[in-house]
Image (spheres, rainbow, N blue to C red):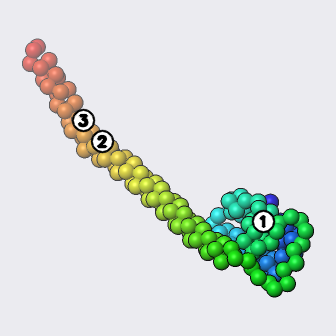
Amino acid sequence: MTKQEFLDELALRLREEGAERLVAENVNYYRGYIEGEVAKGRREEEVLSELGNPALIARSILDAAGYRVDGVPDQNPDGDLGEDAGSYYRTQSEERERQKDRNIHVEVRQVNSWIAGILFLLFVVLLVLAVLDFIIWAVPIILALLLLSFMYRALMQFFQR
């Protein structure tokens, strides 16, 4: 499902119940939310999957606004959102704040894994340098010992004659 399909489905479900006044506000909200998450670097499919079924979201919006979700457009001439609308929108706001906190935790984990990768690479480079330093330091000593050993054997053979 694409962003536009999601928004079209949400608008359609709201209109089916006669909640035309809720369409623009909620479609704009979800469009902004999706675009904001995509701007943060998330894939659109991931955001839409996380949001879930637009029909269920529409049902929640309609329930909170006091509409009977029965496929028959409600007559709500006074534009009253119903008693539960305030708590619904507070809950949505709280959910957005929780989502922001989750996003911050994900970003921190990504930064931590990035730092861990750099530290591991630094460790490997230092290990290679230590091995090379040992080789550079040890090879001349080993060669000197081999040369001394060779000279010792040669001198021993010379004096045994």
Give the side of residue 143 with respect to residue 71, left or right: left
- Of badges 1 and 3, nearer the viewer stands 1
Residue identifier under label 2: 135
- For marks 3 and 2, give the CA distance: 12 Å
The x and y percentages for residue 54 are 78, 64
In the displayed structure, 112 sits above or below 29; it is above
Furthest-left residue in this view = 159
- For marks 1 and 2, give the CA distance: 72 Å
The amino acid at mark 3 is Leu
Residue 126 circle label: none
Residue displayed at 35% across by 47% down: 127
Dot 3: within a 10 Å radius of its alpha carbon, few (fewer than 14), some, or many (20 or more) residues? few
Residue identifier under label 1: 59
The x and y percentages for residue 13 are 85, 68
Q: Quadrant of the N terminus?
A: bottom right
> In what element is the residue under mark 3?
helix
Give the side of residue 79 with respect to residue 32, left or right: right
Dot 1: within a 10 Å radius of its alpha carbon, few (fewer than 14), some, or many (20 or more) residues? some
Residue 143 circle label: 3
Q: Nearer the viewer, residue 9 or 128?
A: 9
- Of badges 3 and 2, nearer the viewer stands 2
Which of pointers 1 and 2 lies earlier in the amino acid sequence? 1
The answer to whether mark 3 and mark 2 are in CB contact below 8 A is no
- For marks 1 and 3, give the CA distance: 83 Å
Q: Nearer the viewer, residue 20 or 34?
A: 20
Residue displayed at 21% across by 38% down: 141
- Of badges 1 and 2, nearer the viewer stands 1
